[in-house]
Amino acid sequence: MDSLLKVNNVTMQFGGLRALGDVNFEIVEGEIFGLIGPNGAGKTTLFNCVTGVYAPTEGAVEFAGAPITGKRPDQIVDIGICRTFQQIRLFPNMTALENVIVGVDARHRTSVFGAIFRSPRRKREERESEDEALRLLDFCGVKRYANDLGRNLSYGDQRRLEIARALATKPKLVLLDEPAAGMNPVEKNGLRGLVRKIRDEGTTVLLIEHDMKVVMGLSDRVAVLDHGEVIAEGHPEEVQSDPKVIEAYLGTGGAATDGKAGQENSASDEPGTVSARAREPGGEK
Ligand SMILES: Nc1ncnc2c1ncn2[C@@H]1O[C@H](COP(=O)(O)OP(=O)(O)O)[C@@H](O)[C@H]1O
Ligand SMILES: [Mg+2]
């Protein structure tokens, strides 16, 4: 299998803060690749470097053999990489269907003239967009909410809707930033099935996830970031038993890993415990 994404010596510096330091890894076409690490480790920053939100301070990102470093987010989408966000970003006052059509339309190329006068081509595109959006809503298990406003969907269904919108751009690689955050165990189980289905349909998946059961159960390979550096990489079983990884999650707090680090916590911010270090960050990155 060919390598689809290559992250080569990527460093991201925010003023005096080194969010990523010399990060290297490679994702093979057709795999589910998990990216884990305590809160603040640099996972979302890495997504931002891959998707053109940030240009890395040093290093390069390659996709399907071509350099993509420095390209704009819309160019990255055109190339075939799409993402979801840690903090859900839907159009709350548009229907679920409309939210996905936005993603489909990103691929269409009608001129402004064609759009205003609704040329036959434009009308055909609109029909096709709607059909495709409905197919994706169905694929993601939220078709029954097609005509409901985005904001009226449950949290778990909004996450699914966001995935449908990302898939609408027909990505070769989809980046999911904590898709199971806030989901209950039943929803998490369903999400695992969906992520597998996405991969089985031919889309490679890069997954950030705190829930160990979800990420270890799904991923072909896992990389662990800690303080902006990759401290371990390999098959889930190898990574789970790596002392460096255990140390990164346990810190000095001494709590035991219970298979779901980072899920049960919210308020405390003391460093060094699993719950504090692995919890969800407060702000959107
Ligand atoms: N735009 C930014 N400006 C300054 N610091 C940032 C910015 N984005 C992220 N950071 C910092 O980089 C570090 C890594 O953050 P992030 O990538 O969000 O971690 P993770 O997703 O692993 O929880 C944190 O210390 C965070 O505060
Ligand atoms: Mg994050």
Image (spheres, rainbow, N blue to C red):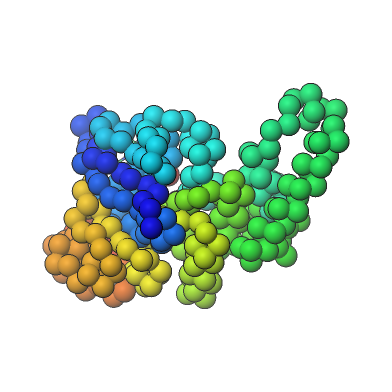
Locate residue 213: give its quadrant: bottom left
Q: Position of residue 257 (x, y in %)?
A: 25, 72
At a point 72% along the width and 57% down the height, the residue shown is 134
Q: Position of residue 163 (x, y in %)?
A: 56, 55
At a point 38% along the width and 72% down the height, the residue shown is 217
Q: In the drawing, does residue 72 fall left or right of residue 140?
A: left
Name the residue nearer the viewer: 274 or 5: 5
Above or below, comparing residue 6 to residue 153 in the picture: above
Above or below, comparing residue 77 to residue 38 in the picture: above
Locate residue 122: give its quadrant: top right
Locate residue 219: give its quadrant: bottom left
Name the residue nearer the viewer: 13 or 26: 26
Name the residue nearer the viewer: 264 or 222: 222
At a point 47% along the width and 59% down the height, the residue shown is 179
> How many marks are shown on the rendered structure?
0
At a point 61% along the width and 63% down the height, the residue shown is 140
Q: In the drawing, does residue 218 fall left or right of residue 151?
A: left
Q: Position of residue 131 (x, y in %)?
A: 75, 53
Tell me the quadrant of ligand 1: top left
Residue 184 seen in the current view: no
Above or below, comparing residue 73 to residue 204 in the picture: above
The C terminus: image quadrant: top left
Report the residue that reaches farthest toward the front: 1
Residue 37 seen in the current view: yes
The N terminus: image quadrant: bottom left
Q: Position of residue 106 (x, y in %)?
A: 63, 39
Report the residue that reaches farthest toward the top: 113
